[in-house]
Image (spheres, grey):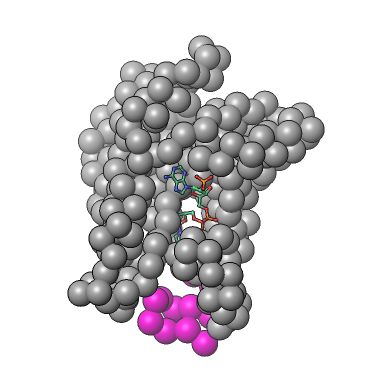
Amino acid sequence: MIMKTILITGATAGIGEACALQFGAQGHRLIVTGRRQDRLNQLVVRLKNEGIQVASLCFDVTKKSEVDAAIASLTKTWQDVDVLINNAGLAVGLELLQDGVVDDWERMIDTNIKGLLYVTRAIAPNMVERKDGHIINVSSIAGKDVYKYGNVYCATKHAVDALSKAMRIDMLEDGIKVSNIAPGMVETEFSLVRFKGDADRAEVVYQQFVPLKAEDIADAIVYVTNTPKHVCVNDMVITPTAQANPFYTV
Ligand code: NAP
């Protein structure tokens, strides 16, 4: 297997962290990122103890100046990112649109859409110049359907879905692969963030049926990343067996 340099946004928890552990186990070089420096430090120690080459960048994807400064700070040996995993994202709140909290909307739009764009804008030119690279965007089944109370989160994930298509077109001539990953319900810190730290409310979400684990999505992302150069998985929808789509579960 060819060793790749893989940058993962949102590697301090959930799907991003599971990706870091799985890619690390395959011997890839990792750039792990997130806002929580303590979590990043713990992850770096864990990966280094397993002999994995790792760099970390602590930044907020919603702040373009932080994104640009962090990417610019990469030393020469880390600058050629082969795979960018745009995973950092969140849902905040669950209200009808007419009752919506504007600050929550802005956090979702700034993180899920603008943050993904800022990071991609900082990394993609190097891929295009080298005519080699793979961008993997973590969208959601909320980017395929719209469910009650999901309004703005669903809109941001529809935007990710559209941006995956747009990136694939815009970088087609440069040989850049773009993959869109659309998970259904995954048990991570996602619901804790959505319900602003209310652990009881978050826990109930995962008691309704057997959800996916972060590792299940990492498995899929690893598969997509390891396809031969002439193969691009464009779009992958993965739900728990008990979830047909946002509306039908058992
Ligand atoms: P999670 O456990 O809450 O992890 C989210 C990650 O995103 C954390 O590492 C967090 O790190 C990072 N992040 C959030 N805001 C950030 C910001 N402003 N700047 C930098 N990093 C930021 O949730 P998850 O389930 O793994 O979510 C990963 C992705 O999967 C998201 O895009 C989410 O929308 C998507 N997804 C999740 C589900 C699900 O059911 N869990 C379903 C479909 C899609 P810091 O807090 O350290 O910054």
Residue 18, position in %: x, y? 62, 50
In the picture shown, does residue 196 fall above or below 119? below
Q: Residue at x 45, y 47 (%)?
A: 88
Residue lying furthest left: 98
Q: Is residue 69 visible?
A: yes
The quadrant holding residue 204 is bottom right
Where does the image place residue 58, in percent across and percent down from the top left? 52, 33
Q: Magenta stretch mostly in which secondary structure?
A: loop
Residue at 42% in and 52% down: 89
**Residue 242 highlighted magenta (yes or no):** yes
Quadrant where the N terminus sits is top right
Describe residue 107's horizontal placement relative to residue 73 as left or right: left
Quadrant in the picture for residue 202: bottom right
Residue 33 at x, y = what percent? 53, 36
Total marks placed: 0
Magenta part of the chain: 236-250
Magenta stretch: includes residue 238: yes
Q: Is residue 5 left or right of residue 143?
A: right
Residue at 59% across, 58% down: 214
Q: Is residue 182 left or right of residue 209?
A: left
Q: Is residue 47 in view from this perspective?
A: no
| 244, above or below 21, in the image | below
